[in-house]
Image (tube, rainbow, N blue to C red):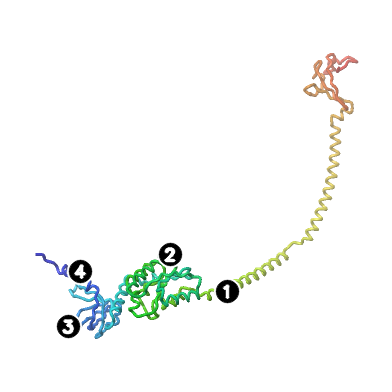
Amino acid sequence: MAVYSVTQVSHYIKQLLAQDPLISDLWISGEVSNGRPSQTGHVYFTLKDASAQLRCIMFSKGNGIELIADGAAIVAHGRVSLYEARGSLDFVADIVMAEGAGPLSLEFERLKTKLEKEGLFEPSRKRPLPQFPKVIGLVTSPTGAALQDILKILSRRYPLAQVLLAPTLVQGPEAVPGIISAVQTICADGRAEVIILARGGGSLEDLWAFNEEAVARTIFACPIPVVSAIGHETDYTIADFVADVRAPTPSAATEMIAPDRRELMAGVASLVERSNSALRGLSEKCRASLDDTLARLHRSAPDIALWRRQVDELLQETHTSTSRLVVDLKNRVAALSGQVEALSPLSALRRGYAAVERQPAGEAISSIHQLKANDSIKVTLSDGAFPAVANPSVRKATNGKSAAPAGARLFE
């Protein structure tokens, strides 16, 4: 026989309760008694009717916790759970509403609480709307007044935008799959920069398609910013909480998305005027700066006339000095030419001397001892030259040697 501990049994019972689809998602109506708020903000209370009572707890973040008061008739949503430490069976409430609320209201609060806990309403994930959208996706009924209102406002305010309509039913059993398909179609197209989810006003039953969980999760998964414009200003749906922006009406949604062309034109005109004014100011400032610079340049500019006169004087002095230098150089050249002329061999030739060269080498002969008999030589005089041959019988007295006999010829 197996023997179990109290902890094991309590844990097993708690698991059974959690797996039961009825008591894990339950609405209970009754009268509140023994309400005891704790320091942490939780409220402990009892729900009772004529025949039974059930211990309850609602944590501080619960929806409608302010309605829990002794004697109040309420309807609470939550789950039945076992508190193992004390072995007590408790109803853990997450939604409390006043008794008399209809089933749609109860379901609305239940789904709203569920999706809020999952983070579908988190403000940090809300995306900004495009400032100047080129393509606007529109999910609405093709025959509803919302479509005509949106198109009329767009044509007046911002006719540049293109409308990409994904028509769908917005009421009835076919509305939910139609809305989901329309949103997905626009997302798959890829051109739209924002989506308007719109329909006119109606009762809670008429708007219920926008309170369905599948629609909420489709909006959450949409990669394009979604503006919900469902019903009138006082109507709220689950889609409003999930959407990036909630508009009170379809017309208001259009005005949020589409800039007013008249305001844009006025803004452009204002910018043009401000630009022109800035350019005029800049031009005047530049002109004043240029005038100031020209004035300073004029004050600091050199005296050109004085410089021209000085240059003329320098040129005159240079010309005079150059002329004297040229004369001096001519005189020096003439003197040097005279000296060169006096030292020139031609001058000696003109005085009766001759120049003798051995042929064909052209060697200059300055002594008869350089010659051999019958050497060919060239004799150059002042007015010409002639060839000759050395005479072997003639020698000039040199260094004590005998001189040539009288009448002897040196050359032949």
Give the crowd class for mark 2: few <14, some 14-19, many >=20 residues within 10 Å: few
Residue topped by disc 2 = 190
Q: Do tag 1 and tag 3 residues touch (Cβ < 8 Å)?
A: no
Give the crowd class for mark 3: few <14, some 14-19, many >=20 residues within 10 Å: few
Residue found at the very far front of the displayed protein: 143
Along the polypeptide, which appears first: circle 1 or circle 3?
3
Q: Do tag 4 and tag 2 residues touch (Cβ < 8 Å)?
A: no
Residue topped by disc 3 = 51
Type of the residue with mark 4: Gln
The image position of residue 344, as x and y in percent, is: 84, 31
Q: Nearer the viewer, residue 321 or 150?
A: 150
Along the polypeptide, which appears first: circle 2 or circle 1?
2
What is the spatial separation of the Cα atoms under label 1 and label 4, in whole angstroms? 71 Å
Give the crowd class for mark 4: few <14, some 14-19, many >=20 residues within 10 Å: few
What is the spatial separation of the Cα atoms under label 2 and label 1, in whole angstroms? 34 Å
Type of the residue with mark 2: Gly
- Looking at the image, is 313 positioned above or below residue 39? above
Type of the residue with mark 1: Ala
Type of the residue with mark 3: Ser
Residue topped by disc 1 = 269
Q: Describe residue 48's horizontal placement relative to residue 397 as left or right.
A: left
Q: Nearer the viewer, residue 288 or 24?
A: 24
Residue 36 seen anywhere in this rendered image of the structure:
yes
Along the polypeptide, which appears first: circle 1 or circle 4?
4
Residue 119 seen anywhere in this rendered image of the structure:
no
Judged from the image, the secondary structure of the residue bearing numbered disc 2 is loop
The image position of residue 5, as x and y in percent, is: 14, 67
Q: Describe residue 75's horizontal placement relative to residue 363 as left or right.
A: left
Residue topped by disc 4 = 15
- Which quarter shows the C terminus? top right
The image position of residue 317, as x and y in percent, is: 82, 52
- Mark nearest the camera among 3 and 2 is 2
